[in-house]
Amino acid sequence: MKQVMGIVNLQESSASIRDLTVTRAVESLPFAGRYRLMDFALSSLVNSGINSVGVTLPDYSRSVLDHIRSGKDWDLARRRDGLTWLPAALPDNDSRKGDLKDLYANLDFVELNDRKYVVLTAGSFVYNIDFNDVFKFMEETEADITMVYHVAKRDRNAKNVVVQTSTNGIVTDLAETSSVKKGDKLAMSIYLMPVPTFAYIVRSTYERGGQDFTIDGIIRHANEHKISAYEHKGYIAHVNSTSEYYKANRDMLKPEIWEQIFMQKERPIFTKVKDEVPVQYKNTANVKNSLVANGCIIRGTVENSIIFRGVNIGKDAVVKDCILMQRCDVGEGAKVENLIADKNVIISKNRWLKGAENYPYIVAKNVRI
């Protein structure tokens, strides 16, 4: 894969997950105790042998820059190639939204690179994929563009791009829908193509008023290119709403899914390294089926929950079906269920908070209850 470069697109809409993305990009949301959503795309690229990676900066970029830094934790801090930041387009008279404007502003990164192919990925998906298999599929089908899809396992209401293919994997139709049915083939916002093809789509689409790479660049010009679709059969989650974020985190409590994502010997998931003390489980602690990160102090009961670094849970407190981000504090005797607490939340002694399984209660960053 030395002839392939990667771009991780962090310019995605966060309208359906606004409660957690007021001051951060959706791709930088904390996940599974110690990771960020963008770790999965970055790690999959690096594990596939792609060591020239560009990352488009979102509007709220501080958390992204703080997390990735030089790219050292992904072996991307190199003298040649490695990590390249792709800044947002400068403000001008063009008020268009979407990712196409930023891709257009950074086309020189692609065209001046010595790689022959580019793979564009989104940063809001949870998966562990080998892009070598995608590249081989593109060669076998002799396609101009190869995209990656997965088969929906349940019905849900959310915007998605549905793919239809022939028996040989060639795309026959693409359409954006507002709902998903079980069995639909859903695009994963991964596109592999030669550099000239990518540059042509971005330049011609943007200069003709386009805004979104997938909708305006791929779907509306699909008849101009031979597109093949590679099926990813492993676990996949698209975090495009609060409920999907909650569900995807809880999926990590299932051993078979955890193994698919994090226990692939040749494809580990990398993240920013933080050296913290081990978890302290006190004599009164009772923990069942939960992920608890380093630096936590547990004195109460924790069930079916994701606990991030540095969380303190007091004596006689009960935390059930919750996501508690970094440095949260649950006071003595407090009871919380079906709750997502952002960073630095303090839940006072003997407080009771409960959300619904499909609509978890959300506590914003730095709030004291």
Image (tube, rainbow, N blue to C red):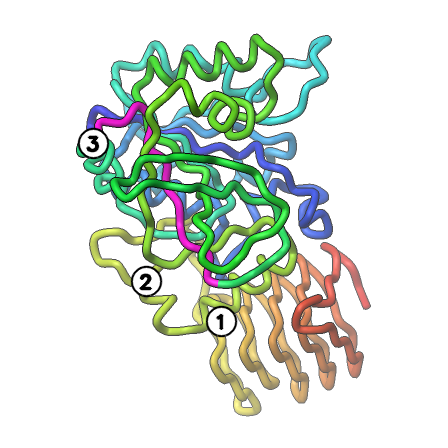
- Where, quadrant-wise, is the C terminus in this rendering? bottom right
Label 1 crowding class (10 Å Cα cut-off): few <14, some 14-19, many 20+?
Answer: many
Q: How much space separates mark 2 and mark 1, taking CA atoms?
A: 19 Å
Does any portion of residue 178 appear in the rendered image? Answer: yes
Q: Which residue is mark 3?
A: 1
Residue type at the position of mark 3? Met
Sequence-first disc among 2 and 1: 2
Identify the magenta region. 142-153
Taking depth in this image into account, of 62 and 178 the one nearest to the observer is 178
Name which residue lies at 80% across and 64% down.
368
User: 346 above or below 353?
Assistant: above
Q: Are marks 2 and 1 in contact (CB under 8 Å)?
A: no
Taking depth in this image into account, of 64 and 122 the one nearest to the observer is 122
Residue type at the position of mark 1? Val
Q: How much space separates mark 1 and mark 3, taking CA atoms?
A: 36 Å
Name which residue lies at 36% across and 21% down.
225
Q: What element does badge 3 sit on?
A: loop
- Which of the 4 image quadrants contains residue 133? top left
Left or right, 308 with respect to 73, comes to: right
Does any portion of residue 326 appear in the rendered image? Answer: no
**Which one is in front in this view, the residue at disc 2 or the one at disc 1?**
2
Left or right, 318 with respect to 216, comes to: right
Q: Which residue is mark 1?
A: 292
Q: Which residue is mark 2?
A: 260
Numbered-mark total: 3
Residue type at the position of mark 2? Gln
Percent from the top left, x then y, of residue 3? Answer: 21, 24
User: 337 above or below 181?
Assistant: below
- Where, quadrant-wise, is the N terminus in this rendering? top left
Task: Based on the picture, tell me whether residue 362 belongs to the magenta stretch.
Answer: no
Q: What element does badge 1 sit on?
A: strand
Task: Based on the picture, tell me whether residue 151 belongs to the magenta stretch.
Answer: yes
